[in-house]
């Protein structure tokens, strides 16, 4: 017989064999024992949690000739026929490929006929949320009042897509994600029976990657067994799942907490070269950061929970790193994880996240808190009282001045403008204007062509920072580089070494001595628009010649006429980009 996947061989044949769904299986068994069988059931939950398996077991149990405590015997002819998929009274339908009105009408026409061998005719409709609106409407009446010999079992992974009218006509059972301990226990049972050796850490990695699905866990285990020649090792499990070991993630976090950007980026690069998945890395980082928070607040609770173990190298940082920094890192990691779902450049996002981890905390959140001489509480309170008294006196003086003066007083203090939440980054507008005045599309194409080669010459830390920047305008004398993130632009503006290396490498490839002007990508369209508007106004205000003969007037005007704004824009950005629209 051909080889069968583990999840097919080890599919449960009784309710007792279903892992992690005790509430569901016990309820179904009791319904069979007391003969309180409903006409329609709805099984909803994540993939690989036993919905279809429970539906088949239930179909056997209600038709079994010799049931035992609500369980099928798996020995009678009915049970064996269902196990071999040859009983015509148990019909499985895949709603993903049979989702039309005609298929449901066919079911509606056939339910009136009694079963041929079994007691009940059971319809199992998998992925029922894939049915069309018309198909759901065709199913409503039959589902509400089917014949006494028919049972419907609907299974879905997306309950929110099932109409409320369908849900209200069924008994709804929610299948839960299977905890990692139960997944590991089942895999140990399988490996022991097959007499295959394994590393316990490898099974933990597989359980995490399965995300609560037994079918996924057994599929990954199958891959690891094929990859590792009948031994489940930690290295093979990491290779198959794309996960990273706790020690590798701990090495990365150690570099982050020490503000060693180069080492952190080198670690990430090594993990990517070994085939690790960015999403798995970020999920592992979030789990370790959460464990650090728990270690700070409740070490006893962390030991009792079935969480990813905290490496010994990270234990000292549980007291040295502040809660605020850990919260900020978790938020940044979660934000990046959401961005990965819509991007094909996972390595780029993780490198940017690494830069954010380090550069966002160097100045304000050192790894080891520095002990400072704090003022006594009494002195602080006294100082605050003095400040409040001064402010009250100032307010009274301003109110008195306003009463005695009808107009604005030159001595009246100006109202302090509110402090912006984020200080605007200073842009050298004159430098930008000088670039735009001589910029051409040819120069920009040349810079963009050598840009990847230039990035490869930078150090890992500088290269990661420049991954979120791109040239947007260029002339033979200067180049405008726009940064996607304001905080990265701020860091680059303060890094003179980066600017020097950037200029030297670009000039090396371009064979010139062009300057580098840094701007924020969000501000670039407005800078460009302002330049074009100012240039157009200047051209319109050029005075006409005072004495020109009528015969020479038209040629003179043609020779002196300035280039139009459209021509200038096309020269700057290319004819393919510029689109002219009437006012």
Image (cartoon, helix red, strand yellow):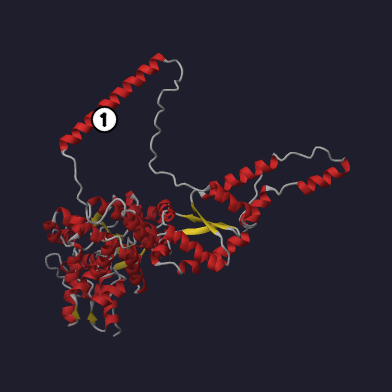
Q: Position of residue 216 (x, y in %)?
A: 28, 69
Residue nearest the viewer, comparing 76 with 234: 234
- Residue 406 vertical position relative to residue 293 in the rendered view, above or below: above
| Residue 288 shown left or right of residue 445 in the figure | left
Q: Position of residue 410 (x, y in %)?
A: 45, 22
Residue 276 visible: no
Q: Within the image, what quadrant is residue 552 found in?
A: top right
Q: Within the image, what quadrant is residue 472 found in?
A: bottom right
Residue nearest the viewer, comparing 28 with 554: 554
Q: Position of residue 484 (x, y in %)?
A: 45, 54
Assign the N terminus to one quadrant of the image: bottom left
Please tell me which residue is depicted at 27% across the width and 81% down the height of the picture.
228
- Residue 294 vertical position relative to residue 56 in the rendered view, above or below: above
Q: Position of residue 491 (x, y in %)?
A: 40, 54
Please tell me which residue is depicted at 16% across the width and 53% down the height of the picture.
297
Please tell me which residue is depicted at 43% across the width and 57% down the height of the picture.
496
Residue 159 visible: yes
Q: Residue furthest right?
A: 551
Residue nearest the viewer, comparing 492 with 302: 492
Q: Secondary structure at mark 1?
A: helix
Look at mark 1 in the image and give the residue it sits on. 387
**Mark 1: few/some/many CA within 10 Å (<14, 14-19, 20+):** few
């Amino acid at each position: 017989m051909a080889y069968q996947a583990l999840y097919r061989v080890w599919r449960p044949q009784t309710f007792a064999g279903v892992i992690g769904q005790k509430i569901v299986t016990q309820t179904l068994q009791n319904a069979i024992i007391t003969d309180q069988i409903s006409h329609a059931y709805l099984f909803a939950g994540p993939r690989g949690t036993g919905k279809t398996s429970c539906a088949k077991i239930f179909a056997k149990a209600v038709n079994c000739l010799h049931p035992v405590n609500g369980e099928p015997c798996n020995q009678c002819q009915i049970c064996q026929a269902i196990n071999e998929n040859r009983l015509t009274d148990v019909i499985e339908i895949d709603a993903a490929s049979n989702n039309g009105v005609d298929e449901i009408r066919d079911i509606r026409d056939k339910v009136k006929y009694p079963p041929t061998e079994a007691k009940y005719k059971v319809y199992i409709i998998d992925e029922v949320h894939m049915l069309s609106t018309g198909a759901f409407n065709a199913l409503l009446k039959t589902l509400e009042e089917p014949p006494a010999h028919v049972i419907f079992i609907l299974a879905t992974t997306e309950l929110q897509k099932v109409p409320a009218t369908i849900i209200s006509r069924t008994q709804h059972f929610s299948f839960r994600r299977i905890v990692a301990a139960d997944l590991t226990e089942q895999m140990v049972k399988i490996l022991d029976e097959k007499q295959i050796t394994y590393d316990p850490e490898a099974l933990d990695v597989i359980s995490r990657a399965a995300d609560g699905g037994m079918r996924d866990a057994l599929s990954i285990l199958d891959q690891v067994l094929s990859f590792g020649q009948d031994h489940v090792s930690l290295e093979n499990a990491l290779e198959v799942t794309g996960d990273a070991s706790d020690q590798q993630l701990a090495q990365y976090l150690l570099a982050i907490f020490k503000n060693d950007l180069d080492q952190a980026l080198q670690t990430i690069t090594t993990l990517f070269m070994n085939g690790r998945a960015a999403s798995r890395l970020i999920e592992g980082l979030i789990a370790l950061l959460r464990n650090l928070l728990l270690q700070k607040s409740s070490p006893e609770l962390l030991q009792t929970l079935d969480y990813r173990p905290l490496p010994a190298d990270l234990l000292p940082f549980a007291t040295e790193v502040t809660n605020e920094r850990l919260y900020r890192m978790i938020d940044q990691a979660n934000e990046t994880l959401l961005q990965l779902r819509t991007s094909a450049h996972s390595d780029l996002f993780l490198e940017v996240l690494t830069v954010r981890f380090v550069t966002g905390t160097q100045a304000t959140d050192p790894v080891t808190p520095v002990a400072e001489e704090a003022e006594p509480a009494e002195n602080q309170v006294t100082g605050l009282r003095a400040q409040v008294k001064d402010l009250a006196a100032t307010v009274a003086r301003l109110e008195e001045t306003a009463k005695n003066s009808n107009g604005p007083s030159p001595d009246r203090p100006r109202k302090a403008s509110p402090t912006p939440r984020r200080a605007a980054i200073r842009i050298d507008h004159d430098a930008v204007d000088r670039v735009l005045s001589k910029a051409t599309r040819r120069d920009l194409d040349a810079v963009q062509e050598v840009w990847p080669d230039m990035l490869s010459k930078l150090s890992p830390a500088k290269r990661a920072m420049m991954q979120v920047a791109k040239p947007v305008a260029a002339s033979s004398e200067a180049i405008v580089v726009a940064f996607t993130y304001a905080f990265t632009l701020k860091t680059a503006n303060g890094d003179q070494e980066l600017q020097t290396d950037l200029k030297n490498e670009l000039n090396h490839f371009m064979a010139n001595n062009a300057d580098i002007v840094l701007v924020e990508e969000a501000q670039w369209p407005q800078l460009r628009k302002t330049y074009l508007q100012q240039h157009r106004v200047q051209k319109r205000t050029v005075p006409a010649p005072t004495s020109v003969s009528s015969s020479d007037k038209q040629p003179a005007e043609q020779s002196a006429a300035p280039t139009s704004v459209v021509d200038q824009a096309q020269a700057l950005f290319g004819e393919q980009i510029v689109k002219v629209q009437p006012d």
